[in-house]
Amino acid sequence: MPKLDKAYNASLVEDKWYEHWIDKNYFSADPNSKKEPYTIVIPPPNVTGMLTVGHVLNNTIQDVLIRKARMEGKEACWIPGTDHASIATESKVVSMLQEKGINKEDLTREDFLKYAWEWKDKYGGIIIRQLKKLGCSCDWEKERFTMDKDYTKAVLTAFVELYNKGLIYKGHRLVNWCPVSKSAISDEEVIHKEKNGFLWHFRYSIKDSNDFLVVATTRPETMLGDTAVAVNPNDSRYKNLVGKKIILPITGREIPIIYDEYVDPDFGSGCVKITPAHDPNDFLIAEKHGLDFINIMNEDASLNKNTPKAYNGLSREEGRAKVIKDLEILGLLEKTENYINKVGYSERGNVPIESYLSEQWFMRMTELAKPAIDAIKNDKIKFHPPHWTKTYNHWMDNIKDWCISRQLWWGHQIPVWYHNDDKTNIHVSIDGPVDIENWTQESDVLDTWASSWLWPIAVHSWPEDGDSLRKFYPTNTLVTGPDIIFFWVARMIMTGYEFQNEAPFKDVYFTSLLRDETGKKLSKSLGNSPDPFDLFEEYGTDAVRFGVMLMSPQGLDVLFSSDRLEIGRNFMNKLWNACRFVDMNIPDDWESQKINVDIKKLDLAEQWILSRLSKTIDEYNFQLDRFHFNEAAKVLYDFTWNDFCDWYVEIAKIKFYSTNFKSAEIARFISVKCLRTILGLLHPFSPFITEELWQHFKVKDSGDLIVSKWPEPELFYDEIIESDMSNLKEVITAVRSIRSRMNVPNSKSSDLFVRCNKNQELFLTTHLDLIKTLAKTDNISMSSTLKKPVQSATAVANGMELYIPLDGLVDLEQERLRMQKRVFEIKKLLGAIDGKLSNQNFLERAPEKVISKEKINHQKLSDEHIKLMANLEILK
RNA sequence: GGGCGAUUAGCUCAGUUGGUUAGAGCGCUACGUUGACAUCGUAGAGGUCGGCGGUUCGACUCCGUCAUCGCCCA
């Protein structure tokens, strides 16, 4: 094996390994395997989607879980796929056609779908290729699309079953209407935005009277569809209007004045215009009072024939302007106020929605929601972080019927047929009636979420009861954004129980929302999302994966900045070089199995690094098990950099360069052992670089890292070892600190005098070579009666007084100030401990462990205090 | 209007069930290219953990309240 290059070149190795993994079939999951399954279904991105930094986060997390499970010996199954995303895709295809000068209205359904499929074939799957670039170890043979033949069958089966159970019905209702897509949309697809607008006050004349009422509205154009004016029955101003009528201006229609508690007397004038066909609240009032419903709009929200002729065909904006102008001319515009109102926007059309009366298909949700509510209550499904259960419960407890029909073409056409002779005669089935020529199929398609809500079961060709479904359902973990908790997560739980009688997953991990440095959500439309490919190019894919994971805490938003990816890049560089260094010090034919190592006989540094290694594995697993990926990354980063590189590798150098062959062999053995573990643990986060490095360190003729065994802790903690090592480090750091303070150049060594007891002397003597090398000292003298050399700098470390003679270099005044500062600190700390130890309540109630810890600490600090005072005395 | 979350070093953030001399990265200061790494090393400065009150022997951590910011739902 050739030695490692000086710097890691990500672009050279990434594709190589991905192809290798695919060739070896490592990603494919076998439904007939005896291994315990571990399954994830990908949140299927829009078929025409592009990879965003959000996807990088989301899919890296899934890959981490899957790769870890695979290494743990489970049958790891990650099912990928894409979503047809009905309305989102259709609106893209429509604008694409518009650019070509083609109007959707001029096309037949078949022609339009041909364009849509062409478009899907052309742009679809971009994101799939991008996910491969990211390194995702999905089972690509199981890739699904929500409009695949099998998948469609599942969607239609669900519809038919629910219809037959009476859970789906057709109704003439007020729905959220998107005038751009000319389709109904669900409540969840309406985005409420605050807008600066106006509140117009109009005068409505009372019939047979010279009086008028003043109504206030933010939507003047809807007055053309008013069918009443309402006041609060308790409003004394309007007590005498019972039975009176209003002459509605412009239209001249007569409409009643009605009384209803709903009206807020403090809003505006206390009179409210009622437009039942265009406002959900007014709709309810109208039903209650038996008012007329006048629809004044066409499907594109222009004004229709139910408005006066002069208004026909005007857009709602033009209509509004004309109403205001006409009323002003009539002298009926009382005043105009500035007003901030909340306007519902269509998520996809990005224009204000209309409340619009139409015939739609609805799903009754209350029954479906019940088992899904229980699943969360009984911890059958756990949310991470758990606080999302509150949001979930709130929505579920107030769940409303779901409008599932869309007046679109791209999607699953609703499997309902109307008899040509009698429209009320309907047929509901997957394949349609036998005499299909006498029937016409419902033209609406289903809401896209009414297909993706079946994802965990439909990817296995449900309703077929195959091996795949049995082995890989339910899944283990769902990783998704909290923004689709209602759209998708809740509804998948419902279908899981409805069709499989089982929760679709055990854990749901909600990812962080990524924002830019100013706090805006990263999105393509805002143009503030960097292209992940540029990032891969600049930092390396592994570095991006690691960096993004490190900066994303569980349950909080992330202020993303590509600068922060440098941490990842630097870490990869550090790892690479640590490996390179160890590699350089390993002979070509060296094999770790040939070294006999008795762990009990290792020296302090070696036992220490193994102890730290074991602890790291434990802590790392702990953090991953609780889905704290950022902390897991941190644990590994800290061990690798601070323990292994900064200390162990520096110590190993001493051994590599010594003439003691045996000790060099052990150092090689320990270094390789650490590196193998680090590479294994890091592999799920950064698969490419670790696989590349693994080839240099793996046991000869053993397999690839991706399928190697997950590192296990060896229960090798040793408190005494850890504390001894920390004492040794403290001495070394104290000497370094003195040297740095006194500006001793690194190339120059110093002498060291230590006043210490016999045990400490023995301890230091054992580790003399370490201290000499790591602290740059030559002659070390130790004794309990040692006198401080004149012109020397002082430090107290672990009860030992360290002196470094520095002729003419020591600024006595500065040294004194430094020591006094420390004395002051110690006094403060001792004061706090004295306070506790003299508190009877503390002594009685605090656990013994805490008390003894305080006492030991007190002892240590007092000792340091005494020594500092003595040394200060000498300086005087 | 209802709900959820956040507030810790100049910046961006960690901080398991209440007990640490409160941590990291970046930035900053000083020194340093000794053959893994300047995408680096060594040493250092920097915080009364948003305010007030409470529970407790003990609060960054638990409770209440207020303030500011963000999100969701009506």
Image (cartoon, coloured by chain):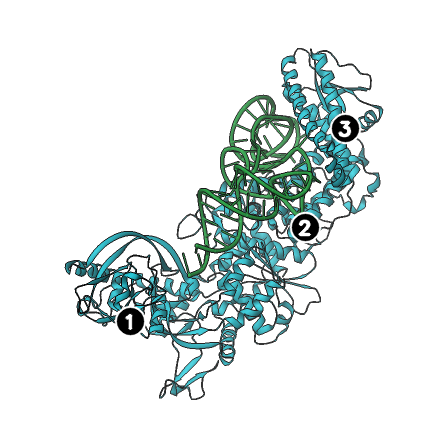
Chain colours: A cyan, B green
Say what secondary structure mark 2 lies in: helix
Task: Please provide percent x and percent y for residue A68.
Answer: 65, 55
Up/down of A160 relative to A855, above or below: below
A206 and A332: which is toward the camera: A206
Say what secondary structure mark 3 lies in: helix
Q: Mark 3 Cα within 10 Å, few/some/many (few <14, many 20+)?
A: few
The residue type indicated by label 3 comes to Gln
Task: Please provide percent x and percent y for residue A826.
Answer: 68, 25
Task: Tell me if residue A500 can be seen.
Answer: yes
Task: Please provide percent x and percent y for residue A112.
Answer: 36, 70
Task: Please provide percent x and percent y for residue A605.
Answer: 76, 35
Same chain for the residues at labels 1 and 3, yes or no? yes
First in sequence, mark 1 or 3: give its number: 1
Q: Chain of mark 3?
A: A
The residue mark sitting in front, 3 or 2, is: 3
Say what secondary structure mark 1 lies in: loop
The residue mark sitting in front, 1 or 2, is: 1
Q: Mark 1 Cα within 10 Å, few/some/many (few <14, many 20+)?
A: many
In the image, is A199 to the left or to the right of A694?
left
- Tally the marks: 3
Residue under circle 3?
Answer: A859
Residue under circle 1?
Answer: A295
Q: CA distance from mark 1 to mark 3?
A: 86 Å
Residue under circle 2?
Answer: A622
Q: CA distance from mark 3 to mark 2?
A: 35 Å
Give the quarter of the figure containing the N terminus of chain A: top right
- Residue pictured at 53% horizontal, 61% vertical: A392
Which mark is drawn over residue A527? none
- Residue pictured at 84% horizontal, 42% vertical: A598
Give the quarter of the figure containing the C terminus of chain A: top right
Up/down of A850 relative to A319, above or below: above
The residue type indicated by label 1 comes to Asn
